[in-house]
Amino acid sequence: MRLADLPTPALLLDRAALGRNLRMMAEAVGRHGVTLRPHLKTAKSIDVAMLAAPAFGPITVSTLAEARHFAEAGFRDQIYAVGIVPAKLDAVAALNARGADVKVITDDVETARAVAAHPGRIRALAEVDVGESRGGVAADDDALPAIAAALGPRFAGVLTHAGHSYAGRSVAEIRAIAEAERAGIVRAAERLRAAGHQVGIVSMGSSPTALHAASLEGVTEVRAGVYMFGDLMQVELHTQKMEDVAISVLASVIGRRPAQNRLLIDAGALALSKDRGTQGMAKDYGFGLLVDLAGRASFGEAIVTRAYQEHGVVECDRPLPFEALPVGAKVRVLPNHACLTAAAYDRYHVVDGAADEVVAVWPRVNAW
């Protein structure tokens, strides 16, 4: 099957770029001598997991659907890295009763007590906030030792996520955030150890901080996920090159407006997402960058500037080659945010580099 044969919109995955990205992260984390626990929340694919976490290594998930899907495939060592609620504990315990080791996270003392009281085999990590101000308690908060005490023997360690690293605008800024993340989670672990708790896991991570951290001393593992695919935000954050963005959306030209130098494509908000992650960055890529079938930016800065439900409007910094882009022509769109773009699809059509042959179809697990 060729790209020209696919109905659009369709999600493409470049296997060669994926391989480069996986090697890049493995080498970046490996030089620190810590464990890489890939986050599969973006990929949601067994085929990708087999490459990212070979030999059924440890992984991170963000939904129970992912946890179940990967556990059934043999990935037992998991962290479900979204704050757990007591109503979900039965489902986690059921997975663990079948041989998995799905660990949960919490920043709430009452929830920690519910985990400790559950009859199933469940361990939990205390979530620590190192500056993102999303989930987690501060390393010096009295709630931290209270959570560990409430969990008792089910306490597995501490975990944090420097999501605010995406606000960095230079490698130096991201490196500083990475050091604050490392120092914060290590401080939390040291404080708990001083109080007599065993802290087996000291987990931090985001793709920018994992790649740019100068030191990971005191950390036992790093979690990162979007690095596998990359996107235009990662390009702007200097964590990946444009040619290493591994996913794209195949779209068809459905309208042409030569007088306005515009194209209309059949990939809109549902196919691309409405994420505007590059809006505050040096280069704003709107809702995505239009490239040719080989993945090259041969049209110039052809940007999806408007996204309706099923329509995308493309505008360019130079005259578009309308003679080469008739209605029905196939193009690709590089995403602003790989995680949200991929979420609309149930499969990847896998290509290898610039070749237009679909070499495999890899299913994804969606929903919750």
Image (spheres, rainbow, N blue to C red):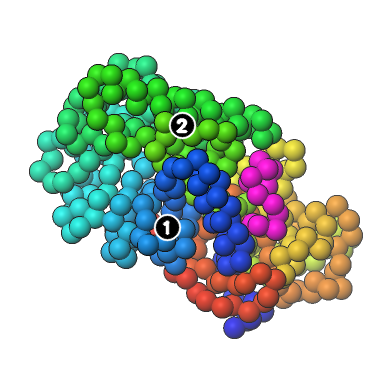
Tell me if mark 2 has few (under 14), some (14-19) or many (20+) residues whose alpha carbon lies within 10 angstroms of its own: few
Image quadrant assignment for residue 83:
top left
Of 152 and 275, nearer the camera is 152
What percent of the width, then of the height, locates residue 224? 48, 46
Name the residue furthest left.
119
Q: CA distance from mark 1 to mark 2?
A: 22 Å
Image quadrant assignment for residue 85:
top left
- Classify mark 2: helix, strand or loop: loop
Q: Is residue 76 left or right of residue 208?
A: left
User: Can residue 355 be seen in this snapshot?
Assistant: yes
Tell me if mark 1 has few (under 14), some (14-19) or many (20+) residues whose alpha carbon lies within 10 angstroms of its own: many
Q: Is residue 89 left or right of residue 346?
A: left
Q: For the N terminus, give its image quadrant.
A: bottom right
Kindly identify the amino acid type of the residue bearing the numbered disc 1. Ala
User: Can residue 87 be seen in this snapshot?
Assistant: no
As drawn, the label of residue 231 is none
Which residue shows up at 80% across the image and 54% down it? 301
What percent of the width, then of the height, locates residue 304? 71, 54
Tag 1 residue: 53
207 relative to 165, above or below? below
What percent of the width, then of the height, locates residue 362? 47, 71
Range shown magenta: 233-246
Q: Is residue 21 left or right of residue 130?
A: right
Which residue shows up at 64% across the image and 68% down it? 250
- Total marks placed: 2
